[in-house]
Image (cartoon, grey):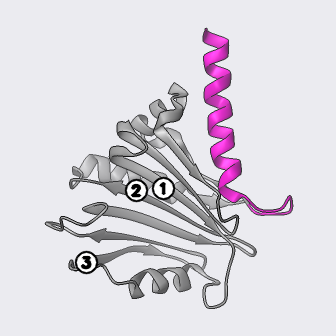
Amino acid sequence: MGKRYLNKAVRALFVLLMLAAAMPARAEKLVFDHRLYAPLKAVLDSGDNDMIAYNASNPRYVVDLIAVKGKSASDWSEALEIIARSPAKGVRTARDWRAELDARPEGACKATTIPIAEDAASLTFERQMPGCPTARAVTTYSRILGGKRSLFMLTVLFKTAPDESTRQQWLALLQSARIE
C-alpha cells in the first residue's frame, strides 16, 4: 500500500501543477510550495480525488479546486482554487485581471478589498464579504501572477474568517508562487 499510495499522491500533485498551466508545451507553469500549509499537504498526500475538482471545459480558462477542509470539492469550508488563463483582449497583466474582478458586481453584498503586496508581475489581496448569505466565501486571499504567455490566480477561500496563524501560513504559500 505504501508505494502505491505515494505514487498516487505524487501523481495527483504533479497533475495539479502541470494541468494548472493547461497550455501548449512551450507554456509557462505555475509552481508553489504546498508544504507551507500542512492541511493542504495532507489533502494532496491523501490521494483523495473527491477533494479535487478540475474543470478544463474551456482550455483558455482552466480551474482546479482543492478542498483543504471539508468533505469534498463541492462541500468545503476552506479551499484553494487555482485558475490558469490565457491573456485576452483587455486582460494581459495581473493588474488587468484584478480590475476585471473589481468590475464584477457582487450581487446584494459589498466586498471589501485590501491590498497586501504588489510587484511588477503579481499582486496579492484580501477580499472580505462578512454577513453575506450569497457569498461563495466570507474571506479570500488571492495572488495573481502574470507571465509572458499566461496568467494564474491562486485564491484561498474560507467560509468563515480564518485565525491569524492560518492567514499567515496561506500568505506564505501564496508568496511562494512563481511562474517558470
Q: Nearer the viewer, mark 1 or mark 2?
A: 1
Q: Give the residue at the far front of this rendering.
A: 57
Horizontal and vertical percent for residue 180? 73, 59
Q: Find residue 161 and name its label.
A: none
Horizontal and vertical percent for residue 150? 70, 71
Specify whether 151 is left or right of 106: right
- Asked if residue 66 is among those painted magenta in the image, a careful observer would answer no
Within 10 Å of disc 3 (Cα), the crowding (few <14, some 14-19, many 20+) is few
Amino acid of disc 3? Thr
**Quarter of the rendering containing residue 148:** bottom right
**What is the CA distance from the residue labelled 1 to the residue labelled 2?**
6 Å
Q: Can you say which quadrant of the picture contains the N terminus?
A: top right
Within 10 Å of disc 1 (Cα), the crowding (few <14, some 14-19, many 20+) is some
Q: Assign the magenta stretch its main secondary structure.
A: helix
Residue 41 sits above or below residue 57 on the image:
above
Magenta span covers which residues?
1-28
Q: Nearer the viewer, mark 1 or mark 3?
A: 1
Q: Give the residue at the far top of this rendering.
A: 1
Q: Nearer the viewer, residue 109 or 45?
A: 109
Q: How many marks?
A: 3
Q: Which residue is mark 3?
A: 112
Q: Which residue is mark 1?
A: 81
Q: Which residue is mark 2?
A: 156
Q: Are marks 1 and 2 in contact (CB under 8 Å)?
A: yes
Taking the spot 48% from the left edge, 85% from the top edge, the residue there is 100
| Mark before the other along the chain sequence, 3 or 2 | 3
Amino acid of disc 2? Val
